[in-house]
Image: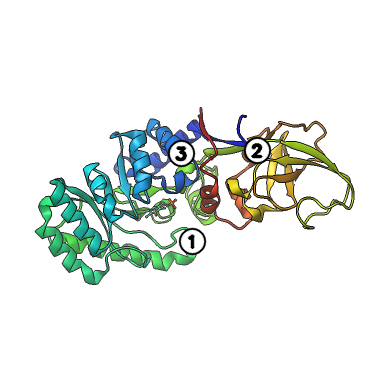
């Protein structure tokens, strides 16, 4: 390894996940691969190339910066949809390149129309409506004006989608709220149709909603976390398993994160390890220094908590995670030496460190932990 660490993306695991998702949703539902947040830390360029090879042709991003990376990687082979921010100065690029985008307020709508007119090219719109999350989306009170505007300007846009987003479908505690949102979305769709304005497709589901509320799948699902082989929450996983006879997890983790031992040191009883006094050796210990720290995305909250694998054995982080380094206990691993492989996420011999167990120790969500992994670490696709 020529770098401090390496991230591997497992293509066959990804193919397995995509096959599972397509089979679950059926032929009529398009799967959009959500690759915001540097493809949930997987590395957006490498990830979208791999996904495209595995048959994915629709990608959802948060902003135009991300859309540009996907575009430069896949050229015109895939559809790109921006779910969040389009700055005014980016509107021309977006429309010129057939990038689709959410429209959730009046100023975005006006800007889109003006630009489409100027370029003499249709803007491809997904009208996002507010159904109860209270984040982005047109309110009910604005719909009449939106519909009138769309009808007046109809030569300048394609009404591609009507969409919304649910406020926490991964938790049964939110069942009532999400259920109300689904009903509201249906009403709004009917209202558009009644006004002779019909979107080509409707979409609303993220990973959790697609499993917990199958009626939210509609024409397209926006799948982030599940394509990476992880569940939105244990509740979603259990809900899925309860619907199946065989109780096997159908998803496989795509990411692995590996490093090597940088240095080894012996420590006496009573010595403190690293900064301060958070860890005192209660026996004679052997410590491995790993060139990974919080600047690479290994959270400081994993100090004295995190687990890594060395020679197929679980080793605990001792002392605090520093900016560029951390120390782990290898007292019981006789044969450990400099440059041996260290697995931060992934499998070694029979054991695995999953993203979930990694995050349980620090109370972080899978999502947050993954997206924190530094962009600077090289990504490599393995078969
Ligand atoms: C992030 C996001 C998704 C995907 O969420 P997952 O839980 O990762 O599947 C879908 N829709 C929108 C609007 C999002 O922001």
Query: What residue is pinned by disc 2?
Result: 343
Contact between labelled residues 1 and 2, with CB atoms less than 8 Å apart? no
Residue 270 at what x, y percent from top left?
89, 53
Q: CA distance from mark 2 to mark 1?
A: 31 Å
Q: What secondary structure is marked by label 1?
A: loop
Taking depth in this image into account, of 20 and 199 the one nearest to the observer is 199
Residue 61 at what x, y percent from top left?
37, 48
Query: What residue is pinned by disc 3?
Result: 17
Query: What residue is pinned by disc 1?
Result: 171
Q: Seen in the image, is 359 located left or right of residue 183?
A: right
Q: CA distance from mark 3 to mark 1?
A: 22 Å
| Viewer can see residue 361 | no
Taking depth in this image into account, of 342 and 327 the one nearest to the observer is 327
Residue 47 at what x, y percent from top left?
44, 37
Residue 112 occupies which quadrant of the picture? bottom left
Can you name the residue that lies furthest to the top here?
Answer: 383
In primary-sequence order, the first of circles 2 and 1 is 1
Q: CA distance from mark 3 to mark 2?
A: 22 Å
């Amino acid at each position: 390894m020529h770098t401090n660490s390496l991230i591997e993306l497992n293509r066959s695991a990804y193919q397995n996940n995509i096959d599972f998702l397509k089979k679950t949703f059926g032929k009529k539902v398009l799967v959009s691969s959500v690759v915001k947040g540097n493809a949930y830390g997987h590395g957006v360029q490498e990830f979208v190339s791999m996904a495209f090879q595995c048959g994915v042709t629709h990608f959802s991003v948060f902003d135009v910066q991300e859309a540009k990376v996907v575009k430069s990687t896949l050229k015109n082979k895939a559809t790109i949809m921006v779910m969040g921010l389009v700055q005014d100065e980016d509107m021309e690029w977006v429309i010129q390149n057939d990038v689709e985008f959410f429209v959730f307020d009046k100023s975005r709508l006006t800007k889109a129309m003006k630009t489409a007119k100027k370029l003499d090219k249709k803007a491809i719109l997904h009208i996002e409506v507010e159904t109860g999350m209270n984040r982005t989306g047109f309110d009910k009170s604005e719909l009449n004006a939106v519909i009138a505007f769309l009808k007046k300007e109809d030569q300048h846009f394609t009404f591609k989608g009507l969409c919304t987003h649910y406020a926490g479908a991964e938790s049964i505690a939110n069942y009532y709220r999400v259920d109300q949102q689904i009903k509201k979305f249906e009403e709004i769709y009917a209202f558009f149709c009644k006004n002779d304005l019909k979107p080509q497709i409707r979409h609303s589901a993220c990973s959790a909603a697609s499993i917990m509320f199958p009626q939210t799948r509609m024409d397209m699902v926006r799948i982030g976390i599940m394509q990476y082989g992880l569940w939105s929450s244990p509740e979603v996983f259990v809900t899925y398993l309860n619907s199946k006879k065989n109780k096997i997890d159908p998803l496989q983790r795509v990411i692995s994160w590996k490093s090597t031992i940088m240095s080894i040191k012996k420590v006496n009883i009573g010595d403190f390890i690293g900064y301060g006094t958070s860890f005192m050796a209660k026996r004679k210990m052997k410590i491995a220094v790993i060139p990974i720290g919080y600047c690479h995305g290994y959270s400081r909250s994993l100090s004295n908590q995190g687990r890594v694998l060395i020679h197929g054995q679980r080793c605990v982080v001792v002392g605090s995670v520093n900016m560029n380094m951390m120390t782990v206990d290898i007292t019981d691993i006789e044969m450990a030496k400099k440059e041996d492989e260290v697995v931060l996420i992934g499998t070694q011999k029979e054991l695995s460190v999953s993203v979930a167990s990694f995050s349980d120790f620090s109370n972080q969500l899978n999502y947050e932990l993954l997206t924190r992994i530094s962009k600077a670490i090289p990504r490599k696709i393995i078969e």
